[in-house]
Image (tube, coloured by chain):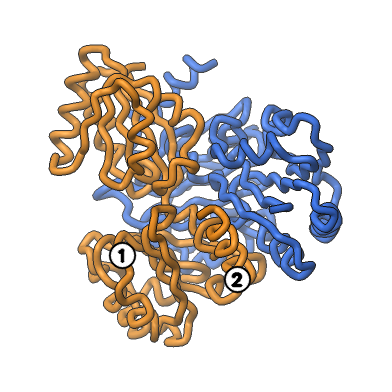
Chain colours: A blue, B orange
């Protein structure tokens, strides 16, 4: 297996899988994303380490094909999961088109660490039985279908990228979601300086002001039901610090 | 930290986190779910290992509180993630109510391993920008809101538990989803004997006949777009076997 497309999880090296760690440790060429923790990148001892920063997706594909063709042990280390709001499939297609063997190793998509690290369960018996995850390709979430989202039951998780949640919250309220519906913003989940702030759709933009990117927005009753869990996570985080 | 609520992931011990493995190895009391891999349970060397099978949720809570109160190192090892279609929050509430310290360790929710292990990405640029995960509490998915699901964009993932997908597929078609929309059933993901079968909403019930439980149903264009990835996963699986 010459090229491995590996999910690095939310960022904390403790959340990477055993198989991912094994591949990173043993690779000759590591191509990694900006949001992957430096401590994880450092496990690729003796490998040439190439940051993906500043490269286009096409250039990344070419890099993988180039080294894969020479039979090097290549790891493409991505944040989160390569195939859940990652772009791993484009890399897989490029490798397949070039006839190069590869392995895919799932990582934890960042939103899946919300319960354990931000203290907000994404579903809870009797509170939310559906989970919807989405992203706005426009950066400010202006391209989402708010009428449909207004009627979507359960919990919403929105990858916000670089922008603040005003636009998202205002549009959800305009489309009919209650202004007092619980909402949270989680900044830099699992990374140093991570912070979770809780409010309602009406207050969340003000509450989240000043938080660092990247961030996730969580909307739904699970946010309000979980003070116990948030407290426990706070205690665990302080102990680990 | 006396009680840890730990996600064991989809089943394959290679998909567990480093922190989870550390806690399982060091615990004195392990309370584990039926779907957790025996190889992972076996890592709790020297611990009293208690299967959750046959216990009510209340009895599990009592067990955790009992041993937690005595200051034992207790691990509650669950399939998937404790707070995404798990019932970890009920255990956290019981521990909080009893004033017992605990730690929460996220696991991979089973659906997140679909791309890497079944070869179906859950989102793909230009194909699906939203992911909806749900479960039918009735077992045959008769209680889902099919009118809303018919209009939900992107990819649907349904935890099916023990039943076959006829009811689900028929109702989605009746509510207006195309009969030729791509669909897949993944049986026993990451466990021995896992199998993925692909068809359409119209054919999936027949295609999936005879598959073992538990299973996941995936509906959406991502299923059809991904022959490369499925092939790669097949190859990787054969090599690992």
Compare residues A69 and B57 and report the one nearer the observer.
Answer: A69
Q: Is residue A227 visible?
A: no
Instruction: Residue B18: give x, y in percent of width and height.
Output: 51, 31
Crowdedness of circle 2 by 10 Å Cα count: few (<14), some, many (20+)?
A: some
Residue B49, by quadrant, is top left
Q: What residue is disc 2 on?
A: B226
Q: Is residue B21 visible?
A: yes
Sequence-wise, which precedes: disc 1 or disc 2? 1
Discs 1/2, front: 1
- Secondary structure type for disc 2: loop
Compare residues A69 and A93 and report the one nearer the observer.
Answer: A69
- Mark 1 and mark 2 residues within 8 Å of each other at the beta carbon: no
What is the quadrant of the C terminus of chain A in the image? top right
Label 1 is found on which chain of the structure? Answer: B
Residue B122's disc is: none
Instruction: Residue A106: give x, y in percent of width and height.
Output: 56, 50
Same subunit, labels 1 and 2: the answer reads yes
Q: Is residue A120 left or right of residue A141?
A: left
Relative height, residue B42 to residue A219 (above, below): above
């Amino acid at each position: 297996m010459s090229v491995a497309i590996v999910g690095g999880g939310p960022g904390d090296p403790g959340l990477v899988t055993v198989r991912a760690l094994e591949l990173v440790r043993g690779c000759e060429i590591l191509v990694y994303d900006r949001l992957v923790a430096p401590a994880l990148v450092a496990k690729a001892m003796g490998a040439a380490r190439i940051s993906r920063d500043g490269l286009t997706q096409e250039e990344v594909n070419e890099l993988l094909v180039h080294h894969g063709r020479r039979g090097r042990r290549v790891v493409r280390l991505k944040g989160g999961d390569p195939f859940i709001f990652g772009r791993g499939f484009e890399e897989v297609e490029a490798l397949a088109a070039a006839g190069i063997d590869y392995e895919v190793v799932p990582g934890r998509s960042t939103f899946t660490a919300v319960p354990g690290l931000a203290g907000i369960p994404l579903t809870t018996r009797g509170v939310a039985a559906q989970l919807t995850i989405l992203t706005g390709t426009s950066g400010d979430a202006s391209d989402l279908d708010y009428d449909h989202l207004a009627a979507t039951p359960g919990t919403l998780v929105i990858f916000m990228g670089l922008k603040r949640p005003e636009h998202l919250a205002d549009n959800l309220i305009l489309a009919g979601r209650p202004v007092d519906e619980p909402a949270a913003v989680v900044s830099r989940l699992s990374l140093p300086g991570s912070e979770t702030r809780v409010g309602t759709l009406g207050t969340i933009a003000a509450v989240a002001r000043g938080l660092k990117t990247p961030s996730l927005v969580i909307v739904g009753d699970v946010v309000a039901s979980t003070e116990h869990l948030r407290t426990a996570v706070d205690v665990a985080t302080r102990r680990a610090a």
